[in-house]
Image (tube, rainbow, N blue to C red):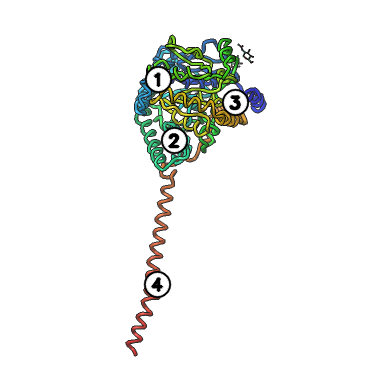
Amino acid sequence: MWHFLTFFLLQYLLGHSSGSRILGVFPHVARSHFMMSETLMKGLAARGHEVVVISHFPQKTQIPNYTDISLVGSMPNFVSTVPLDVIATDSVYTIVTLLAELAVTGCEKTLSHPPVLKLINSKETFDLVITELFNTDCYVGFAYKFQAPFISIVTTPLLPWGYERFANPDNPSYIGNIFLGHSDKMSFLERLVNTIYLKKSQWEYHYWFDLPSQAVARRYFGESLPPLAEFVRNTSLVLVNRHFSLNQPVPNVPSVIEVGGLHVQIPKKLPEDIDKFLNESEHGAIFFSLGSTVRADTFSQQKMAAFLQAFSELPQRILWKWEGSTLPGQPKNIKTAKWLPQVDVLGHPKVRLFLTHGGLMGTMEAVFSGVPMVAIPLFGDQFHNVKNLQDEGIAVKLDHMSVTKEKVLAALREVLSNPSYKENAMAVSRAFRDRPMSPLNTAMFWTEYVIRHRGAPHMRSAALELSWYQYLLLDVIAVLFVITAASLLTLYVIFKKLFHLLVSKPLHSKAEKKKMN
Ligand SMILES: *[C@@H]1O[C@H](CO)[C@@H](O)[C@H](O)[C@H]1NC(C)=O
Ligand SMILES: *[C@@H]1O[C@H](CO)[C@@H](O)[C@H](O)[C@H]1NC(C)=O
Ligand SMILES: *[C@@H]1O[C@H](CO)[C@@H](O)[C@H](O)[C@H]1NC(C)=O
């Protein structure tokens, strides 16, 4: 409903903004990342802008004013390809290395892809460039090439290296690193780890991701391309996939815009067979999906058996996004499908629980529909997301490394039988939806705002001009320290003198008096 109401409100507030040319560059290979950008770009096209989108996921049916530059074939994409044992080795290091490599090879493969090269060497013009703020900034080169203002989109809360370019507060005393599973109320040890992680992530990004990407970008956009770390400080604004009702409340400068849940569409009617399967579930249903990146059928046999046995002992029906051919010894209450319309499934009134890997896109969809969760975080920001859900009282966490039938059953039964999870999920859902404008319309408003104000330089924080020690007031603190120390020293000297005058003199004089007597 919010979409319709605020759509008309937006029309009223803005009138029809004239059609602009917008270039969206989203070459990351994971489908879940593209969902958010795609929703925005489609929305902008529907508002009469001419959008050009570079991605691995071209539209299947043509959309007016939406032009794809397809990257299909330039490098393999990530859809349902990543085996679980690769990512679940519990090693953050593996993920960082993988992402760094993906950043640099991705830049090279994308920029050298013939249709992209053609665009780089064209005389086209754009009023705005939108890129994803993730593992590389090499695509801001398009903004440099077309001399256009640019904004970015983040599919998670702001990444550790995403704060500095906007001078957004990143104080690790209470702002949790998205690669750690801390809440915003941290113990001393957690704050210590959180602080080290923030700096570590920023350095890793600079040296492993940014500098190698920059070398690639300069080959395609010219050696005159400014250092990326400096150029990105001219990003007009960033659209962030977080909302304070679900993620931890944090301070944001005006150029950091929360649009959490932008990709979530109003649930539609399900395909007949799925609708029927859910409708006829006497005790409600559980929706099981590990997202678009990993293959659920790469679970070890032991873990598969744990899930299957647990499911067979429940009266609920299970709808399972399963990429394999057949489920071994499939219990009667399970229905599988290679692909499922997730938002629509979660919106079905009979769905009582979402068994998820804790990806932000899926969990936001569940929050939107008020569905409590059992979450099995696997990598990346998932531990952080799941911690937030636990803190809200809407999820139980299941440890992937030690999955047994008993643990699966205990987690599922806890959420199914304790009504507080559903109640909390409904409360968070109400807070998540209660906004002046829908996230999509918020994003479109600010996108057009930047176009209307030619980059909106007035939103730029003055903190961006300060050096780090000025920002942290270290110079001021040093001067205050010196003044205080000098004052104390002066006072000390004065008091010492006074003491001698007032205390030792009378003594002297007494002694002198005695002598005189
Ligand atoms: C496409 O965009 C142009 C402006 O660039 C606009 O005039 C036209 O109406 C749009 N077309 C559609 C079908 O929305
Ligand atoms: C950032 O923008 C300002 C104002 O347009 C410009 O003077 C400056 O050169 C830009 N910085 C970089 C690194 O491109
Ligand atoms: C499922 O139930 C809903 C609500 O009762 C109904 O509108 C819908 O037609 C049913 N779907 C099927 C396939 O029976």
Q: Is residue 167 visible?
A: no
Q: Give the Cα distance between marks 2 and 3.
A: 31 Å
The residue indicated by pointer 3 is: 441
- Counting residues from the N terminus, which is met first, the one under dot 2 or under dot 1? 2
**Mark 2 → mark 4, Cα distance in angstroms:** 56 Å
> Is mark 4 in CB contact (under 8 Å) with mark 1?
no
- In this rendering, position of residue 18 left or right of residue 126: right
Identify the residue position indicated by label 2 in the image: 182
Pointer 2 with pointer 1, Cβ within 8 A: no
Is label 3 or label 1 in front? 1
Image quarter of the N terminus: top right
Q: Is residue 216 above or below residue 247?
A: above
Q: Residue 268, how many percent across, how many down?
A: 60, 16
Total labels: the figure holds 4
Mark 4 sits on what residue? Answer: 498
| Amino acid found under the numbered disc labelled 2 | His
CA separation, marks 3 and 4? 72 Å
- The numbered mark, 3 or 1, whose residue comes first in the sequence reads 1
Give the amino acid at mark 1.
Answer: Lys
Q: Residue at x 52, y 10 (%)?
A: 60
Looking at mark 1, is its residue's CB closer than 8 Å to ligand 3? no
